[in-house]
């Protein structure tokens, strides 16, 4: 295992398509839920402990070798919003392209054939981590970090927020991110015996509602 591979996978410049998505921040900004650094931190904290936890658990389970099809079905069941399911599969397809080019793997090839329109992004993330020689904890940390870094970066563009302030938000959330990743790995290991029902199913109704409203906007800066 090489930790340098984790840096590559978690790098915002890795060509996985995440730069085009705000993680719900664009809808939250318009609704007045994010107005500056303090409210951004609240938003990211809520996202981390709900959809972030779910994504981290799915990624960890995929890195452990759980059946990708079962995990994809579990991801679908945990994503009520059709708009978010579409976004997750688009991101999964783009991440799959990048991962196969970076860490060629028969397992990635097989999943790409099984899901030509894309598997859910956290599942692909875990498979990419596995192909890169990383473990479930690495996959969970990467997924949890993405759940907050995406909205933070998007808010810099949406509100002209000082990037130093946005980065400070991520730094303050770091201890909680570690705890979420640890919970995700524990749940993924439990799923080996108890099936995908053992994975967290934390919900974030405002994110789901915001995603559906956002998808209907005629003009928007981000895809989701």
Image: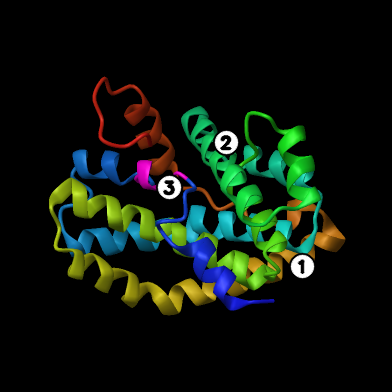
Nearest the camera: 72 or 17?
Answer: 17
Q: Secondary structure at mark 1?
A: helix
Query: Residues under labels 2 and 3: Cα distance?
Result: 12 Å
Instruction: Evaluate if marks 1 and 3 touch, with contact meaning CB atoms under 8 Å apart.
Output: no
Mark 1 and mark 2 lie on one chain; the one further toward the N terminus is: 2
Is residue 7 in sight in this rendering?
yes
Residue bounds of the magenta highlight: 17-22
What is the residue that sits farthest to the right in this orientation? 193
Q: Residue at 77%, 67% (x, y): give it.
A: 189
Q: Residue at 23%, 48% (x, y): give it.
A: 33
Vertical position of residue 71 compared to residue 219: above or below: below
Q: In what quadrant of the picture does the C terminus appear?
A: top left
The x and y percentages for residue 55 are 57, 54
Mark 2 and mark 3 lie on one chain; the one further toward the N terminus is: 3
Q: In what quadrant of the picture does the N terminus appear?
A: bottom right
Q: Which mark is residue 18?
A: 3
Residue mark closest to the camera, 1 vs 3 = 3
11 in magenta: no
Quarter holding residue 20: top left
Say which residue label 2 marks: 89
Is residue 69 in sight in this rendering?
no
Q: Which mark is residue 123?
A: none
Residue mark closest to the camera, 2 vs 3 = 3
What is the residue that sits farthest to the bottom in this orientation? 175
Q: Is residue 203 left or right of residue 129?
A: left
The x and y percentages for residue 96 are 62, 44
Say which residue label 1 marks: 189
Quarter holding residue 171: bottom left
- Label 3 neighbour load within 10 Å: few <14, some 14-19, many 20+: many
Q: Is residue 134 left or right of residue 83?
A: right
């Amino acid at each position: 295992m090489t930790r340098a591979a984790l840096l590559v996978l978690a790098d915002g410049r890795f060509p996985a398509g995440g730069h085009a998505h705000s993680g719900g921040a664009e809808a939250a900004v318009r609704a007045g839920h994010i107005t500056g650094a303090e409210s951004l931190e609240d938003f990211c904290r809520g996202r981390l402990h709900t959809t972030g936890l779910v994504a981290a658990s799915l990624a960890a389970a995929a890195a452990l070798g759980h059946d990708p099809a079962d995990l994809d079905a579990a991801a679908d069941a945990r994503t009520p919003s059709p708009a978010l399911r579409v976004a997750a599969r688009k991101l999964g397809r783009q991440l799959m392209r990048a991962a196969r080019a970076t860490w060629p793997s028969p397992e990635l090839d097989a999943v790409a054939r099984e899901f030509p329109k894309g598997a859910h992004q956290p599942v692909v993330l875990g498979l990419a981590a596995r192909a890169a020689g990383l473990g479930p904890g690495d996959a969970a940390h990467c997924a949890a970090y993405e759940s907050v870094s995406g909205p933070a970066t998007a808010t810099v563009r949406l509100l002209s927020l000082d990037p130093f302030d946005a980065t400070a938000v991520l730094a303050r959330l770091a201890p909680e991110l570690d705890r979420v990743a640890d919970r995700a790995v524990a749940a993924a290991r439990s799923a080996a015996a108890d099936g995908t029902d053992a994975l967290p199913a934390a919900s974030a109704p405002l994110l789901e509602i915001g995603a559906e409203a956002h998808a209907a906007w005629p003009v928007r800066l981000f895809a989701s």
